[in-house]
Amino acid sequence: MSEPTILLLAHADGSRVVTSFKQQPLNDADPFTDGRQVAWSGTDGVSAGIVDAGKILNIEDFPHTEVIVVHTGHVTLKTQEQTLELAVGASAVIGRGTALRIEAQAGTQWAFCAMTTEAPKPDLTWLDPLATLSPSAAPEQQILIGPTPQCRSRNAFEDATTEMRVGVWDSTPYERHGRAHKLNELMYLIEGTVTLLAPDGSSVTVGTGDSVFVPQGAQCAWKSTRYVRKVYAVK
């Protein structure tokens, strides 16, 4: 496994990212064997990257839990109970063990964060970008640079077995010192811009419509000068 570092997965405008990807399935049952591009694969079963899709698949038992954020094209997810239509910017969670039909238009691409687990949690969960949020904890006072921000969040999906949580978070502007990231986290910015800084002085600017993944343990500082709202998936 490579050293954990900040990994930009996709830009809103489709422009090239410098992140390195490796074409490989997550497991033998991965339905996206040819289109799975992995940027991170951890020993804890968490992976992140992008998927290039453009076909119809009928899956009886989805082999892992996967959070997807659509960057190009359109995806339809269908189970017996519900249908999710995901255009650019939409996001959802496919639970492990879900029986579903996936209809992806040609040229569709999504950013993903996946968790391998033996425990099934079959379901589709749409992530509402306009969800009503509740106050949540701000960063620790000792790492803040300047005033304490006002933060809010809402979990839309929780898996007690893997401790994976997916939802929406927002915050007023703030800056903090670098520290090892406490969890693996996929972030998709619904609104705002944030600069994530590494100890070597390099930085990744994440804007509205961009997706980034920060592995657990990666050294990362935060600087935002305006309101930020994001979809998150943490484990």
Image: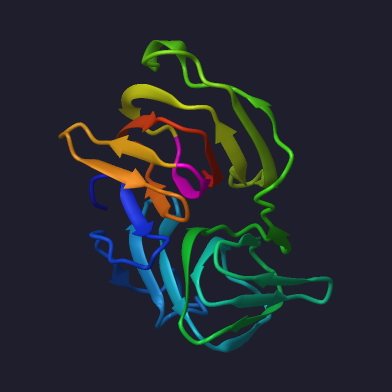
Depth check: give the residue in front, 109 or 180.
Answer: 109
Residue drawn at (69%, 52%), measured in percent from left and top?
128
Depth check: give the residue in front, 11 or 93.
Answer: 11
Residue drawn at (37%, 59%), measured in percent from left and top?
9
Residue drawn at (55%, 30%), measured in percent from left and top?
171
Residue 1: x, y in percent? 27, 53
Where 102 sits versus 160, above or below? below
Residue 121: x, y in percent? 70, 59
Farthest left residue in view:
200
Magenta part mainly helix, strand or loop? strand
Residue 76 included in the magenta stretch of the image: no
Residue drawn at (64%, 35%), measured in percent from left and top?
153
Which range of residues does the magenta coloring cover? 183-192
Q: Please tell me in which quadrant of the rendered image residue 3 appears.
A: top left
Residue 185 included in the magenta stretch of the image: yes
Where 182 sits versus 191, above or below? above
Residue 72: x, y in percent? 48, 73
Where 232 sits versus 121, above or below? above
Depth check: give the residue in front, 161 or 59.
Answer: 59
Q: Please tell me in which quadrant of the rendered image residue 47 appears.
A: bottom left
Farthest front residue in view:
226
